[in-house]
Amino acid sequence: MTTLPQIRHVEPQRFQPKPPELERESYDGIVHYIEHGYPSPRVRWHCHDEYELHLIVSTSGKLFVGDYIGEFSPGHLVLTGPRLPHNWISGSVPDEGVLLRDMILQFAHEPLEQAARLIPELRELLPLLERSIYGIEFLDIGAEAEQDFLRIRASGGAERFGHFVNFMCRLARNNKYRLLSSATMRSYDDEGTLAKVNAVLSYITDNYRDPISAEAVADQLGMSLSKFSRFFRKTTGNSFTDFVTRLRVNKACQLLMNTDHYVTNVCYDVGFQNVANFNRRFLQIKGVTPKEFRRQAGGRFGTAASAEADA
């Protein structure tokens, strides 16, 4: 495993990867509809100032939202908040690609916030928008949501806005959802901060299997430990230690779902140093033990039966 001194002197190009691209678009109206196939130039690690409601209509693959890594398939519906980095990467795709994979709605915060001050009925959307800073996956709603996207695509003006509000109100009342990212990445002060924090997050993601410390990363940024700790909590909503732990647990979830590796092996593969601590932190974050998570994942995701896990 990589030792602390090696982490402290990691090559600059490894520590400073390209940050998520900040996507900017201008359009008329509050609600902007986009669709694209796969592959597409839009499929990249990026973020933008708008909220995004994203529906997958074909292909399966890996989803990345903030520090979350998961699976997607047709019917997958996610709402991401402003500046929350995200990407969907499809797995097996025909050589000719697919014509339509993504149906997307983008909309800005300020018009809705101003409207909610004047129109009390719109205020029920505000808690939903607040939750979206983590990314929200809505469960078992894909087929219904596709019809909403089609209605919005086919309409314009006040009619489009009416369809949009109706759709969003139903999502606000929907209690079948889960929050995705443990990092709330909406608090960037400027583009320099955006690039800096995402360089740190990319570094952690690249090195989570190894012993890494806040001191080492602070040193790379030329910050004191206390200044770095404040910076990291402000920009991600987590302490450095909690973020690394949550990332390791998310990585463990992927191995538990997609492999038959022993739980003991998964523990060390994702950077935990002992099984007892791994089991304790996993239970703390996911609410179930690694063995129970694998059992539940087998039912929800159709994963193969696992090998008997180590104690």
Image (cartoon, grey):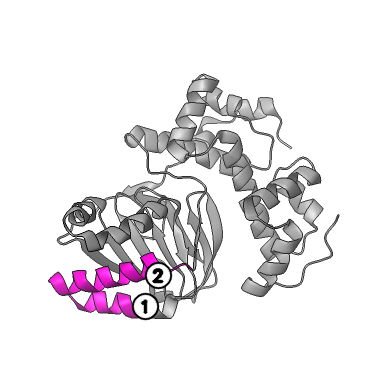
Q: Residue 164 in the image: x percent, y percent?
A: 26, 69
Q: Secondary structure at mark 2?
A: strand
**Crowding near the residue tagged with mark 1, few <14, some 14–19, many ≥20 C-alpha atoms within 10 Å:** some
**Mark 2 vs mark 1, CA separation in Å:** 7 Å
Nearest the eye: 9 or 136: 136
- Left or right: residue 174 versus residue 306 is left
Q: Which residue is mark 1?
A: 146
Name the residue at 36% across, 47% down. 83
Q: Is residue 173 magenta?
A: yes
Q: Secondary structure at mark 1?
A: helix
Query: Measured along the vertical axis of the image, is residue 104 above or below residue 69?
Result: below
Q: Is residue 261 magenta?
A: no
The answer to whether mark 2 and mark 1 are in CB contact below 8 A is yes
What is the quadrant of residue 309 in the picture? bottom right
Nearest the eye: 259 or 250: 250
Read off the magenta span: 147-175
Three-letter amino acid code of the residue under disc 1: Glu
**Crowding near the residue tagged with mark 2, few <14, some 14–19, many ≥20 C-alpha atoms within 10 Å:** many
What is the quadrant of residue 290 in the picture? bottom right
Residue 302 appears in the figure: no
Secondary structure of the magenta portion, mostly? Answer: helix
Query: Measured along the vertical axis of the image, is residue 158 above or below residue 212?
Result: below
- Left or right: residue 168 versus residue 87 is left
Q: Residue 144 in the image: x percent, y percent?
A: 39, 80
Number of numbered discs present? 2
Q: Which residue is mark 2?
A: 55
Q: Quadrant of the C terminus?
A: bottom right
Q: Residue 189 in the image: x percent, y percent?
A: 33, 34
Residue 185 appears in the figure: yes
